[in-house]
Structure formats: C-alpha cells, structure tokens
Image (tube, rainbow, N blue to C red):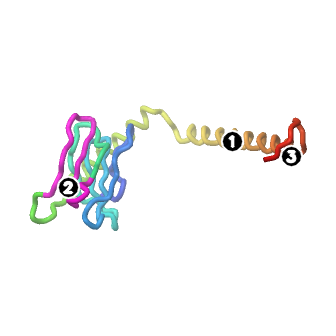
Amino acid sequence: MGLPTAGASIANTSSPSGVNFFGSEEDYVISGSDCGHIFIWDRRSGRLLRVMMADEWVVNCLEPHPLQALVLASSGIQEDIKIWSPTAAEPQFTAAATMEEVATTNTSRRQRAARRLGLRHDLLFSLVDQRHKRMKEEHAELRRDIEALDRGVGGGDMTA
C-alpha cells in the first residue's frame, strides 16, 4: 500500500466535515473527519502530509486564522476548540506508517458502516432507476398539460 492521496483515508460516515485551504499561499488543503483526525494535504500533488488527532469523535469545523497563515482552529463534538500552530523550526510530516494505519482503520470503519446500512449496489441502482422512471413520467405528464393549455383545453386565457 502506498502513501494515501487526496481523500483516500478520510472517514465520513455520519456528518459533513470541514474542508478548507490553508497556508500563506493556500498550498495545503485541510479536512476534518469522523475519526477525529485533521488531515493536511498538499494542494498541488494531493499527497497526504500530516495527520493530527484532534477530537475523540469528529472534527467538523476547521478555520484558518485570517491573518496568521499557519494558525488553525478546530472543533468537533467535544466541548473545546483547539488552536493549532507550528512549533518546529522545520516542517514535520507524519510518518507513512501512521498515515497507513489511519487509512486502514478508516477503510474498515467505512466498510462496517456500509454493512450496517445494508445498501447493496444492486438495490441502490434499482432505487435510482425507479426515480428516473418516475421523473420521466412526471415530465411527460407536465408536457401533456402544457400542450393542452396551448390548445386552449381547460378554459381560461393564458396571457401575461
């Protein structure tokens, strides 16, 4: 398994999570997740650079500081707001093994959630197909109503 790329290791099964650009030149994309981590991605390559544990459950809000490019506020389900800022003289990246471990855990979590939901692909396609057929029928009925109005059926003059 190689290093995760954009979106590969985020676990969002129950709530939308914050996504934002980050850095003085907006060189990074930051995102929260349902696993309580903050992910920092390189905007250009999509490579995952850093994973930080931020909440016991969910990180659903990430806001960069408006004036200090590398200061970040995060919040989740816990009752606190965390302020993040770099403390190292040189950039520190999360070890590849740690990122792979988080990605593996999140993949398992998504698979368990999908099994709990019980939605199979064939059922999902069937539902989409039924919706498409209903929309076609509704469109045809609407077209017939408009044609009837244009012919003057149904009384009343339709002028603006």
Q: Write the start and end of the magenta stretch as one range.
A: 64-86
* Residue 66 x %, y %: 26, 57
Residue at numbered disc 1: 135
Q: Is mark 1 on a helix, strand or loop?
A: helix
Q: Mark 2 points at which residue?
A: 71
Q: Mark 1 touching mark 3, by CB under 8 A?
A: no
- Crowdedness of circle 1 by 10 Å Cα count: few (<14), some, many (20+)? few
Q: What residue type is labelled 2?
A: Val
Mark 3–mark 2 distance (CA, rounded to whole Å): 62 Å
Give the distance between the C-alpha atoms of the residues marked 1 and 2, in whole angstroms: 48 Å
Position of residue 146 measured from the top left corner of the image (x, y, whole percent): 81, 44
Q: In which quadrant of the rendered view does residue 23 lie?
A: bottom left
Residue at the image point whose x is 60% and y is 38% from the top: 127
Residue position for label 3: 150
Q: Disc 3 vs disc 2: which is toward the camera?
A: 3
**Mark 1 or 3, closer to the camera:** 3
